[in-house]
Image (cartoon, grey):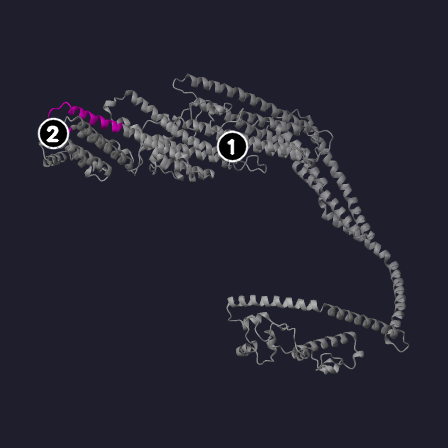
């Protein structure tokens, strides 16, 4: 540990001195180690340095070995234990004076932390080490503060000591320099000065020797110069021969070119000539590189040598180059003459085969290009200009043809639709959706598939494939109208893929500055081509664009008259517009590639502007197509009531499930198909070619996804409205023809099915469709508390209440009719259940046979219990009215008790239809009212046993009739 109060003995032991202020060598304990050798002056400088190093090392070892640690040093700073006793106990050291002890003492200069921890604290817990380390850190910080305080207190003394030491060192150096100078001036024998004189004499001898050698070298050079010159000539000739062997291609090429022309092998001629140009350029580049390297050395001899060498090479090559260029020039002139002499009109029809004239023309143009033509005349420019003009002419003709034909077909379609008697305004033919559904059902019927409300991925794929087939899409005249638009877009795609692609390839090929054809330097052809592309895209956009922004909540097919045939349904719209969208995307990708290629080769600054315009156009067209599909989708959903004929669709294998109509299953298949097609439209880009210019967005915008979400929820709401519209129309029809006095539950089947439809929609179909929408479009609608389900519940309750009200009204009329008949009776000789009770119970039987098989069990049970309650309420009310009139026949009271007990007892054996507590309480109230009436009479002509006997008899006789309640 650091000790500020060492005693005199410790300091003397540490420094190896007998006194605190030693003045001579005798004051140190080991004098022999400190005395220098006697022949120190005779030793060399290296030997004297070695003596000094050994002296310092021995002194340091002496100090170290002589130092004795204090009591605090020998304590473990972490635990406070005695290190000596601990190490002796572990057998690490032999005694207190063992040198190994210094490794484990923290204050020692030989302290080894690894040995300290692995030996002293081998078994110490980590927690204790951490705690001790914190305490040690605090102690070190405290002692550091103390040391700083001591330094601050003795700062002036330290500075004075440092100044004294520096002055002593300077005086020592000055005295040494002065002694050296006096030694050099001394006349006493000095070996060093003698050696210096020898060196100066040696320098004059070497000069004479160097001069002699130079003379000898000059004589030798003169003697061997003729030999060297002869050898140089041989070497030059040898290098020239070697160069010719290495570059044999140049010297053999003239003969090869002549042979190629003789055999009409023009391709080999051009290939070898172009190879010659490349090799010529390469050898020139090699010469420049060699000269540049030689000049970088600043060696004129080397530069001259390289220049002479390549001058020799190029002297030989120039004759071969001249002959090759002459042959190539003759061939070029002949090709130009052939090209200019051709009376050629370029044909650039979409898929026409090349004629022999076309092949020859393109072959000549290609040859001239590959020959690096530098002639002033440029027939290729005229050819490209003529080609572009032909493209413009054909495109303009097809545009006009499409406009006229599409307008004519739309007018023809409107005339045909108007002539139909049952066609409504804005309506579409949704019967084709049912036909698609029937084909899917037929497929599932012949396969192992089972009818179920749940649709997995495999079934959905089958549904989408069969709904997507080109058969039975729409009216034939509507399909013909679609084909006009589809064929026009198809023509544009093929036209740009063939005719325009040919022009672009030629332009890029020949407008490239590296080709040597200086065509379209001012960009005339380029600008004309850009304008052609812009006009074409603008025309396509004008077809699909709308005059004003459309409200997505109210969008209808009528908002897209430019490209949507009137009265087209969603099947034909999806089929044709998805194909059209794919073709337009491919078309715009081709155009963007062409624009980029032409713009890049001509160094146009407008290329990015045109690419941006194509991106905007692609986004706009796809948005409008998507909106049109959604418009017909929602429009078809609004007409689904045409498909509702109340035909039941039973799910196989689950007889307890709610029975719904066929139209609901059609709706589910149809919605699945539409969602899959919309997802493919906005996400699937597999049919598009790869291009570095992404004019078609890889992912739909947020606006598009929000719009799809709006249209999806809109389609669901419109479907609900369509179902209610059919319900209202059917209800109105029955109300106009139905005899309310002869109510029949069979006439309310449509109400039951409507209620079932909404129940299935809310519990199964809509949640499934919403979840599927979320999967396809990465949304979370299924996690939201949608108002849709609350609306469905309201509709179900409303329809069920209407059914219940009709049944209650029928029961109420029967009870009223019975009690009205009692007013006319003076006596009642028979003691039996009244007919109105049988009539009401038989109505319950009919409900069981008609209502129960097609309704959820809970819904049916709730309805029966509600009707039971109503029957008892009305019976009680009627008894009270009779009681108030005080016109009561005794036997009537007995019959009423029998009626009441019989009604309750019939349902008693049923687990699900047994009267609930509320109904039983109503029955007790009715019995109480009857007994109050009985108290009016002193003598009743019946007893409780009579009622019990009649009840048992009635129940026994009607047991089979009402067994359906069990």
Q: Are marks 2 and 1 in contact (CB under 8 Å)?
A: no
> Which label is found at residue 827?
none
Tell me residue 574's x, y (percent): 46, 30
User: As rendered, which of 117 and 195 lies closer to the eye?
Assistant: 117
Residue 248 appears in the rendering: yes
User: As rendered, which of 515 and 610 lies closer to the eye?
Assistant: 610
In the image, the segment drawn in magenta is: 806-834
Tell me residue 184's x, y (percent): 88, 73
Q: Quadrant of the N terminus?
A: bottom right
Residue 570 appears in the rendering: no
Q: Is residue 832 magenta?
A: yes
Q: Which residue is mark 1?
A: 582
Q: Quadrant of residue 596?
A: top right
Q: Which residue is mark 2?
A: 890
Tell me residue 646's x, y (percent): 32, 28
**Could you tell me how far apart the alpha carbons at marks 2 and 1 are, in whole angstroms?**
89 Å
Tell me residue 659's x, y (percent): 31, 34
Q: Is residue 822 magenta?
A: yes
Label 1 SS: helix
């Amino acid at each position: 540990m650091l000790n500020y109060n060492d005693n005199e003995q410790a300091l003397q032991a540490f420094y190896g001195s007998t006194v605190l202020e030693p003045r001579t060598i005798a004051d140190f304990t080991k004098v022999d180690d400190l005395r220098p050798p006697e022949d120190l002056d005779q030793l060399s400088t290296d030997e004297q340095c070695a003596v000094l190093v050994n002296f310092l090392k021995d002194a340091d070892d002496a100090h170290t070995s002589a130092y004795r640690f204090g009591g605090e040093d020998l304590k473990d700073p972490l635990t406070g234990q005695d290190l000596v006793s601990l190490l002796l106990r572990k057998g690490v050291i032999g005694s207190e004076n063992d040198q190994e002890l210094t490794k484990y003492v923290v204050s020692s200069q030989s302290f080894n932390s690894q040995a300290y921890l692995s030996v002293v604290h081998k078994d110490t817990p980590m927690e204790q080490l951490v705690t001790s380390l914190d305490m040690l850190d605090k102690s070190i910080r405290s002692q550091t503060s103390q040391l700083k305080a001591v330094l601050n207190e003795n700062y002036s003394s330290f500075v004075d000591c440092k100044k004294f030491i520096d002055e002593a060192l300077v005086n020592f150096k000055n005295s040494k320099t002065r002694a050296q100078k006096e030694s050099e001036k001394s006349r006493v024998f000095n070996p060093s000065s003698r050696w210096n004189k020898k060196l100066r004499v040696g320098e004059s001898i070497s000069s004479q020797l160097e001069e002699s050698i130079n003379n000898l070298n000059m004589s030798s050079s003169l003697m061997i110069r003729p030999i060297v010159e002869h050898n140089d000539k041989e070497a030059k000739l040898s290098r020239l021969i070697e160069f010719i062997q290495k570059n044999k291609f140049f010297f053999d090429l003239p003969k090869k070119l002549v042979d190629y022309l003789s055999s009409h092998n023009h391709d080999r001629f051009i290939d070898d000539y172009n190879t010659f140009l490349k090799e010529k350029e390469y050898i020139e580049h090699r010469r420049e590189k060699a000269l540049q390297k030689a000049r970088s050395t600043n060696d004129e001899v080397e530069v001259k040598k390289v220049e002479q060498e390549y001058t020799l090479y190029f002297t030989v090559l120039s004759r071969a180059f001249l002959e090759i260029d002459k042959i190539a020039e003759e061939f070029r002139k002949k090709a130009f003459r052939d090209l200019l002499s051709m009376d050629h009109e370029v044909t650039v029809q979409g898929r026409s085969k090349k004629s022999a004239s076309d092949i020859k023309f393109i072959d000549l143009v290609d040859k001239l290009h590959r020959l690096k033509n530098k002639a002033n005349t440029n027939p290729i420019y005229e050819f490209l200009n003529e080609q572009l003009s032909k493209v413009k002419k054909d495109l303009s003709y097809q545009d006009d043809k499409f406009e006229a034909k599409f307008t004519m077909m739309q007018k023809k379609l409107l005339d045909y639709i108007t002539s139909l008697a049952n066609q409504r305004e804005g309506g579409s033919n949704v019967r084709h959706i049912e036909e698609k559904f029937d084909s899917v059902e037929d497929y599932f019927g012949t396969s192992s598939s089972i009818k179920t409300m749940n649709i997995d991925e495999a079934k959905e794929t089958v549904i989408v494939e069969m709904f997507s087939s080109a058969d039975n899409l729409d009216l034939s005249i509507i399909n013909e109208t679609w084909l006009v638009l589809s064929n026009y877009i198809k023509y544009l795609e093929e036209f740009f893929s063939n005719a325009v692609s040919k022009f672009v390839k030629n332009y890029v090929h020949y407008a490239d500055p590296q080709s040597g054809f200086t065509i379209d330097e001012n960009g005339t052809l380029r600008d004309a081509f850009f304008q052609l592309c812009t006009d074409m895209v603008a025309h396509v956009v004008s077809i699909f664009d709308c005059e004003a922004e459309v409200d997505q909540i109210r969008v209808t097919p009528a908002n897209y008259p430019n490209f949507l045939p009137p009265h087209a349904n969603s099947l034909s719209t999806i089929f044709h517009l998805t194909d059209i969208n794919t073709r337009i995307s491919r078309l715009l990708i081709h155009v963007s590639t062409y624009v980029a290629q032409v713009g890049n080769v001509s160094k146009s600054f407008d290329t990015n502007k045109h690419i941006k315009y194509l991106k905007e156009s692609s986004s706009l067209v796809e948005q409008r197509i998507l909106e049109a599909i959604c418009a017909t989708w929602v429009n078809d959903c609004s007409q689904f009531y045409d498909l509702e004929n109340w035909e039941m669709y039973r799910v196989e294998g689950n007889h307890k499930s709610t029975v719904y109509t066929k139209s609901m299953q059609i709706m589910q298949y149809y919605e699945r198909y539409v969602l899959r097609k919309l997802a493919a439209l906005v996400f699937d880009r597999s049919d598009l070619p790869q291009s570095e210019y992404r004019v078609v967005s890889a992912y739909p915008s947020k606006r598009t996804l929000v719009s799809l979400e709006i249209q999806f929820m809109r389609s669901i709401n419109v479907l609900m409205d369509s179902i209610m519209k059919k319900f209202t129309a059917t209800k109105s029809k029955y109300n106009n023809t139905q005899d309310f006095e002869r109510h029949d539950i069979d006439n309310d089947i449509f109400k039951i099915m409507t209620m079932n439809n909404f129940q299935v929609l809310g519990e199964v179909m809509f949640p499934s469709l919403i979840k599927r929408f979320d999967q396809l479009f990465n949304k979370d609608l299924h996690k939201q508390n949608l108002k849709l389900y609350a609306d469905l519940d309201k509709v179900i309750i409303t329809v069920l209440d209407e059914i219940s009200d009709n049944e209650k009204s029928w029961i109420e009329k029967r009870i009223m009719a019975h009690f009205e008949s009692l007013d006319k009776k003076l006596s009642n000789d028979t003691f039996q259940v009244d007919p109105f009770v049988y009539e009401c119970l038989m109505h319950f039987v009919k409900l069981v046979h008609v209502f129960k098989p097609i309704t959820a069990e809970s819904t049916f049970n709730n309805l029966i219990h509600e009707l039971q309650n109503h029957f008892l309420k009305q019976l009680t009310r009627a008894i009270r009215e009779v009681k108030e009139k005080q016109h009561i026949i005794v036997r009537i009271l007995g019959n009423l008790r029998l009626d009441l007990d019989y009604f309750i007892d019939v349902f008693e054996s049923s687990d699900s239809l047994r009267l609930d507590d509320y109904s039983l309480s109503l029955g007790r109230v009715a019995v109480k009212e009857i007994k109050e009436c009985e108290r009016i009479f002193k003598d009743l002509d019946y007893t409780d046993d009579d009622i019990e006997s009649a009840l048992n008899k009635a129940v026994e006789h009607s047991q089979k009739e009402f067994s359906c309640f069990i």
